[in-house]
Every structure is written in structure tokens, then in C-alpha cells.
Image: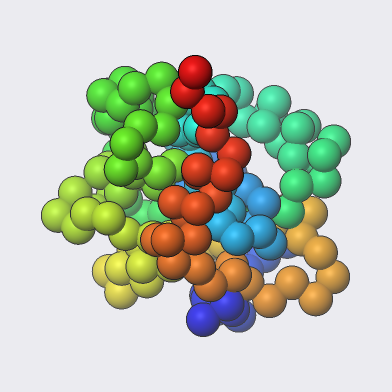
Amino acid sequence: MSDWLLEKYLNIHPGFNSNELTIWVLHADKTPPHIGISIKESFYSLKINGKDDGLAIPTLLQLMDKKEIPTLAITLNIPMSHEQVKSVFLSFGSKIGVNQTCLSPITRLLTPQLNDLILIELLSELDKQEQIKSVYGFNLPHGYVGIPNYTRETIQQRIHAVQPSER
């Protein structure tokens, strides 16, 4: 399932509007990628070592370009306010906690009735509900075919591998 949605939606970033509700798949060629969300030029993401809480989209784009981070930006047809996004991220701690991933706050926002989804499951659900508007690619490597397939166990292994040890 590694070529999920790309043939149906992918654009190489002309026409991208950073004011729209957008799921960001950073390191889109890695297993697992890092996931964030933005609305109204503000980016939010829960990370192992902290969280992005309203990072300006131009700053994110500069970082992606400077480090050549392969990224997908998935714009959505879901009515949502900036305050709703901010409120959900405020309800999470200052970094990924026990039984949480970077996708946890995003799932709570977009599909509160479904818990413990991985990215491909979330995107499939949004696609089924016709809530995906477009997918934009930034810095994608030649021959990129889609989000690599992975499992919940892969996510937990990655979190444990990069998490600082508690001393």
C-alpha cells in the first residue's frame, strides 16, 4: 500500500495554500514519517523531544527546503477553526507521552470516533469520507511512490529508539 493516493491527488506544490487545514507528512520517505497539522499559517506537531505549537508555515517551508526534507502536504475539506486545533494540542503534554504518537492529537481532531489509527488508516478514512482536497509534494526523491507501509509496532520501536533514556 505504499503508493497510497498519490496517483489520485499528487501535485508538486504549485497552488499550495498554507491557510487551509493541512496534514503534513515530513520525512515522507521514512518509516515511520513524522506527522503534523496546520491551519491559518500555523503548524502544530507533537514530538518525542517537545512540540511545535503554532510554528509559522514560512519557517517550516524554509526548514524543509534547507534540509531537503521529503514532505507531503495534504489539504482537507473539513471545517475547523484555529482555536479547535490549538485547544487539542494544548490538551497534550509538552512531548509524546505513554501510548501516544505524533498522530494522536491529529486523530483526536479529525476522527475522534476512531482511536489508535496509523497514518494510512487515517488517510483512507478521510478519503472514504471525501475530505481530502489535494496532496502536494515538496522535495520528494526521484521515483517516490508513496508513504512506506508500516505498523503500530514500527512506530513504537522508533519512539523508543530515539527517546532519551530516563535517568
Residue 83 makes an appearance in the image: no
Coloring scheme used: rainbow
Residue 160 makes an appearance in the image: yes
Is residue 130 or residue 68 the one in the foreground? 68
- Residue 54 in the image: x percent, y percent? 49, 22
Q: How many numbered marks have been drawn onto this rendered protein structure?
A: 0
Is residue 1 or residue 140 the one in the foreground? 1
- Residue 138 in the image: x percent, y percent? 73, 53
Asked whether, in this view, residue 60 is left or right of residue 103, the answer is right
* Residue drawn at x 14%, y 54% as measured from the top left: 113
Task: In the rendered view, tell whether residue 131 sits above or below residue 40.
Answer: below
* Residue drawn at x 41%, y 20% as measured from the top left: 94
- Residue 114 in the image: x percent, y percent? 20, 58
Q: Based on the displayed image, in which of its 4 quarters is residue 143 positioned?
A: bottom right
Asked whether, in this view, residue 39 is left or right of residue 87, the answer is right
* Residue drawn at x 62%, y 48% as measured from the top left: 26
Task: In the rendered view, tell whether residue 167 sits above or below residue 58.
Answer: above
Asked whether, in this view, residue 4 is left or right of residue 29, the answer is left
* Residue drawn at x 75%, y 40% as measured from the top left: 64
Is residue 118 or residue 99 the one in the foreground? 99
Is residue 134 or residue 144 the one in the foreground? 144
Task: In the rendered view, tell whether residue 99 sits above or below residue 142.
Answer: above
- Residue 19 in the image: x percent, y percent? 51, 36
